[in-house]
Amino acid sequence: MSVWKQINDEAARVASVVARSVVQLVGQEGSLGAAVVWRADGLLVTNAHVAVGQRGARTLEAVFHDDQRLSARLLAYDLERDLAALHVARADLTPVAVGDSSQLRAGEYVMALGHPWGVVDGLTGGVLIGGGTQLPEMQGQDWLAVDLPMRPGHSGGALFNAAGELVGINTLIRGPEVSFAVPVNAVKLFMREVTAQQAASASVV
Amino acid sequence: MSSLFKQLSDSMAETVAAVSPSIVRVEARRRLAATGIAWSAEIVVTSNHGVEQEENLYVGLHDGTRASAQLVGRDPSNDLAVLRVPGGTMTPAQWGDNSTLQVGHLVLALGRPTEAVQATLGVVSALIAGTRRTEEAPKKRNRRQMGQVLADGYIQTDVVMYPGFSGGPLLSGDGLFHGLNTSGFRSGASISVPVTTIRNTVMTLLTHGKIKQGYLGVGVQPVRLPAAVAQQLDQETGLLVMSVESASPAEAVGVLVGDIITALDGQTTETVDELLLTLHGERVGKTVTLDLVRGGQTASLQVTIGERS
């Protein structure tokens, strides 16, 4: 078998594993984007701009690969980092394998999974252009720039590496071929804050 | 053993890191910096359109330091410029053999508009053959219109030219640089200037400080040839002379406004680009035949090509 065919097959397998941890978010307007399963007990992460509209928190339903639809409750959001945490009442989910965005190198292959234009599990691939606050178009945000085409609906979905580890949350389209993602280390920090807050506010009985 | 896919990804990232010392930032314009490639310890080759100023030039090095640079010269027809970093200790780039590049190969475009080297991925879309004319070259050209001149051909890819990537290298799987990427040509595709062109330009600029270009001293525009002449020459268009500069080679041999130039030194001139290509530096000082149409009749003159100052 050619190396090319092997690489194609492996990339497809990696993507199919990550897809188990990506759900679709549907609002009254239709498909709004994606969310990634952070914990098996129903904790999801997505973009703030997907979860929160101009009139506040959106009414969202999470659509799973087994076609189950559950209402998703907004736990917390941060517009600055463009992150939101959601909860669904389901405890049998497959959490995504979480990577380390500080280990990312320019030129490494990454793929983005989401639901472009409502198409479930639309995949695109490219390489990491670079990361950090210095990138010309970043306006000081510590985001990852990738040379793959995201479309509306990729937002909140997974950016992952060749090992199938989550390295970012798809966030922003910049031109037809360049996109930005929130680095997964920023997501880890945000999710730690959210869970700590949840624990602190839990009523003691 | 990790998967081939993971190996490919790691290999691309490792190759980028390995060649990074030969990639510099070129600070030669007000907006975002461009990229340059270390040709030798002291010499940087970059894109001409990225060097907007001639003074206060700086080069950002791999170790994070910044060094003052001087402009050696420009080659606008190939969108190249050469800079010198006095006392520089840069790591010279390793250049590949363009003949090993094939349509479909995976390639990376690299840039250093800020501190770190950045990368985008694509495939080789087309290898466009050179149009520099030789005795064996066919009379009719089949080159696609570039709007400008890349006489030695070029590499077309679908890499994304991220802001500041002009002047950076096209990196292939062999870990070698196969061209210099530029968005300076009016074309939708990403264009890389091939190694042979870069080498010629660098050598010429280091020796002479400028690229020799032939000079006739005529202002021309393409026109359709009269039907009878078109049939006779098997050529549809020529270059109508709109003006003749005084004390020019064209004036010296009696070229007149209204003449239509159809060929120079046996090379047809259906477009302005074709005339420019024929007027390359090697023809300077040579006396050659200028074919034209005057008053509906074909005629020819012997003209000595001058040098553009």
Image (cartoon, grey):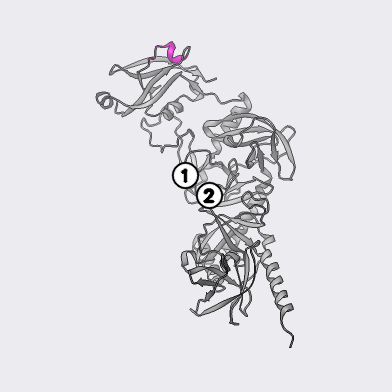
Q: Which chain carries label 2?
A: B
CA–CA distance between discs 1 and 2? Answer: 11 Å
Where residue B26 appears, as percent x and y from the top left, is: 65, 39
Res B1 seen here: no
Tell which circle, 1 or 2, labels the residue nearer the N-terminal end. Answer: 2
Magenta stretch in the rendered image: B248-256
As drawn, the residue found furthest toward the left would be B228
Res A67 seen here: yes
Looking at the picture, does residue B249 appear above or below residue A43?
A: above
Looking at the image, which is closer to me, A62 or B305?
A: A62
Which element is circle 1 on?
loop
Q: As shown in the figure, which amino acid type bears the numbered disc 1? A: Gly
Residue drawn at the location 67% of the way across and 36% of the way down: B40
- Name the residue carrying label 2: B159
Q: As shown in the figure, which amino acid type bears the numbered disc 2? A: Val
Query: Residue B253 appears in which quarter of the rendering?
Result: top left
| Residue B188 numbered mark, or none | 1
| Residue B19 numbered mark, or none | none
